[in-house]
Image (cartoon, rainbow, N blue to C red):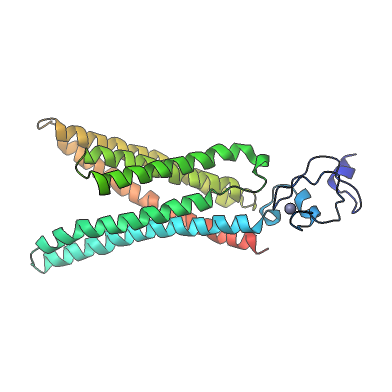
Amino acid sequence: MSNETSQPSASAALQQDVRCTVCGYNLRGLGVGGSCPECGRAISDSCQGDLLRYADPNWVMRMYRGALLVSAAFGLFFAYLIVGGMAFAAVQLAGFQIDAWLKVGPYLLRVVLTASVVIALLGVFLITSQEPREYLLERTTAIRRLARGAILLGVLIFVFKYHVAPNFYSVLMGVFLNLAFVVSLALSLKHAQLVAKRIPDERLAMLLGRWSRRLLVIGLCFSAALMLLFAARITPRPWWANAAYEATTVIGLAYVIVAIVSVGLFLAVAAALKSAAST
Ligand SMILES: [Zn+2]
């Protein structure tokens, strides 16, 4: 009996519900040797379980583009920090007035941040796009939806903070903004982990799980440190103000390192998905 179900002959009709991997059509009652009447995919491909190489290649390519876009969003932001930081240092070393930079810098930051946020939004939505037969993997649905909800919330906070009311509890808004983005990106990594298990690439899946947790933890710590800074700002000269600044700097540096590893992981996911889609 078990042999019959795992290796059905070409003419055998499917006795149980099997969804087409590409369009989700229920193939029950159809011959294993045939094609899906809705989309033409070989029915045998839909009887192979969860492996990505039998999944809808368009869906895999959407996730591939998503992983690339999220890396690009990070990359743009880091490029700004590095190039902007170097320009700032060079201007100061050369002994020029920094007034000009102080005027241009915040404006540029807004432009770069806006572009990064839009690209990250697109990327997270693509990387968490729904598989045609997702009902098979319902546990991933909550992760996908939370990742999308968090980044949408992040975009709303971003628009409010940078384009509507820049002076409204600016540090506090920064805390919420950071929280929304870090939750969304950590969940996107977690989602990528579940996908990587279907390549199957256990090593990549293990790294994705591990760094998804690290990103979440360091992001939460950074938010807590920013909250301390906020408290230091509204309390008159607290004795721990310097400690709060130092803690924020150290956590911020660790955060940058974890974020750089995350960019590398999103790129690794993109490469793995691309090769999974082409096999
Ligand atoms: Zn189909």
- Residue 71 place in picture, x, y as percent: 44, 57
- The one nearer the camera, 272 or 240, is 272
| Residue 260 position in % (x across, y down) | 39, 54
- The mark total stands at 0
Q: Does any portion of residue 215 appear in the rendered image?
A: no
**Looking at the image, is 276 positioned above or below residue 209?**
below
* Residue at the (39%, 57%) spot, across then down: 73
Q: In this view of the protein, which residue sits in the foreground, 174 or 279?
A: 174
Reply above or below: 155 against 265: above
Residue 33 point in image, percent of width and height: 86, 55
The answer to which quarter of the image holds residue 157 is: top left
Q: Quadrant of the N terminus?
A: top right
Q: Quadrant of the C terminus?
A: bottom right
The answer to whether residue 90 is left or right of residue 150 is: left
Q: Where is residue 258 in the image (x, y as percent from the top left)?
A: 39, 49
Left or right of 170 in this view: 59: right
Would residue 255 be visible to someone looking at this image?
yes
Residue at 65 percent across and 49 percent down: it is: 198
Which residue is depicted at the point 22% across and 64% down?
A: 86
Viewer-closest of 191 and 159? 159
Q: Residue at x 54, y 37 (%)?
A: 142
Quarter location, residue 235:
top left
Q: Which residue lies furthest to the bottom in this view?
A: 94
